[in-house]
Structure formats: structure tokens, C-alpha cells
Amino acid sequence: MDQLGIVANISQNIARRGANILNVDIYIDFDNGSPVFYSRSEFSFDPLQWPRDVMEEDFAEIAHIFKAQKSLVRVPECDENLKMAVLASWQDHCLVDLLHRWQEGELPAQIGAVISNHSRGPNTHVVRFLERHGIPYHYLPTTKSDKREGEIVELVKDTDFLVLARYMQVLSSTFLRSYGKDIINIHHGLLPSFKGANPYRQAYQAGVKLIGATSHFVTEELDDGPIIEQMVDRVSHRDTLTTFAMKSENLEKQCLAKAIKYYCEKRIVRYSGNKTIVFG
């Protein structure tokens, strides 16, 4: 809940430890009765003056004083990157893009495994890349009656979150409850439009002039989870279904990468049911 003195208290705590504030982002939600305060601060500090465990205690104390729901601290130089697993089907564009960005150090995450229901031979670009970097690749063919969800849960149990990089299977509520952690999906189109199967064709046949991609959290309701990022581009009557899909794929790659980066940097806060705050 919003109260007087929160920003001052955080700033004073940072200053007394000899740290320098680089950025502060604040949002106050007035839509549900009592205003709720959300904040994210970035600062530089000397770890000798402000050890990691002391920092955690300092912010936990502030959270206790103001009865905050939670306080998250991330120190990139000290904390291990979050570990993710990537699920993909036959389309490679998002998977290949994520692997390239990860190799270039653009994604602050560890890749624990890549799982697919589509076969990739040992000499394919993706499999060779994964072998070169010591990332396990698991091929689990699925059927309508057997989605191999129990095996997937076992393979990803030590990850911090999952990424669906165009994984063309609907995860059951049983799977979501068994895994129990966040799952990020990428969807063509500006949800809630064009949900479900064949979104490219749906949008193309609808004659839209503005296409998009949406990254969102997965919930039991198909394509209805809290939205993290959305991106748009223009199309025209001159676009074929092929060029339409190519433009859409480019948006999907960028939109998914942004969502993963935001998540790993703890920039995302879920609030008010199905909404998210994404701090810049």
C-alpha cells in the first residue's frame, strides 16, 4: 500500500551505504480502492561497504516497516543467472534467435535444456550448437493422447522458468500446477485477437494492416495470461501469406527476447489480476 516516506526511506538507505542511485521507476495503482505503490531502483555500490547479505537485510527491513508484499534484490555480479528451459516445435526462428542472443551475452540467463516434439537430426544447426555449448537436447514426440508432460516436468524441475519458443502444444492445467513456476509464451498478433491455432492465417484472411506479436505468461486459460510485451509492424495488400509470416516471425523474435530479458532482470511485476508492470 502507498504511504508517505517510502521513496525517502529507500533513498536514504542506499545513500547511507555509500551507493549511487542510477535510476528510479515508480508506479502507483489507484484502480482497486487503496493505492498500491510499486518501485524499482538501480544503483551502483561498493560490495566491500555493502555486502550482498547486508543489502538483503536492509531492504527486507524497509519492506517490513511499510508492510510490503515482497522485496526482491538482484546483484548481477553476485547472483547466478536464472535457469530456463526452452520448449519448441518445428519452427526454429525464435529458438535460433534466443540461442544467438544467449551466446552474445544479451540474455542474462542459463539455458538448462531445449525440449522439442519435433525431430531434429544430429547435423542440424540447432543440435550442433547445443552440443557445442553442452546444452541437453530432448526430443519427445507427442500425440493427441500423450503430450509427454510428466517427462517434461521431470526434465525441467530444476529450472527457474520456462520459455515456449513457438511450442505448438497446449500445456494442461495439471502440467502448470506440477511445474508451479512462471512460463513465458510468444504469440503472433496483438492478443486477445487471433487466439489459438493458425494465427498467421487468421490475421492474413482478416485483412489486417497492422500486425503484432505478444509475449505473455501462460495460464490455464489459452492465450489469456498477463501480457509482458507487444510489438507491431505494418502490412499491406501487397503482402503474401509468406511475407506476412516473415514479418510476423521477426516481431516474435524481438518480442520474446525482450520478455525474457525483462523477466531475468526482475523488471516485471504482476498486479491487479491479469496485468503486469514492466519497469523500463
Image (cartoon, rainbow, N blue to C red):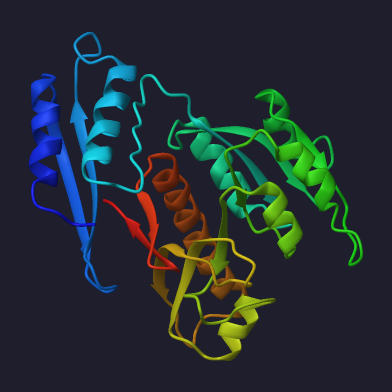
Q: Quick check: can you spot residue 120?
A: no
Q: Residue at x 20, y 14 (%)?
A: 46
Q: Residue at x 23, y 8 (%)?
A: 48
> Depth check: 150 or 115 in front?
150
- Which quadrant holds residue 6? top left
> Would residue 23 appear left or right of 95 to someone viewing this image?
left
The residue lying furthest to the top in this view is 48
The spot of residue 42 in percent (x, y) is: 22, 36
> Would residue 280 appear left or right of 272 to someone viewing this image?
left
> Depth check: 243 or 221 in front?
221
Above or below 133: residue 123: below
Q: Residue at x 42, y 51 (%)?
A: 258
Q: Quick check: can you spot residue 30?
A: yes
The spot of residue 10 in percent (x, y) is: 15, 37
- Which quadrant holds residue 100? top right
The spot of residue 156 in percent (x, y) is: 71, 39
The N terminus, quarter of image: bottom left
- Which quadrant holds residue 174? bottom right
> Depth check: 256 or 119 in front?
256
Q: Residue at x 69, y 29 (%)?
A: 135
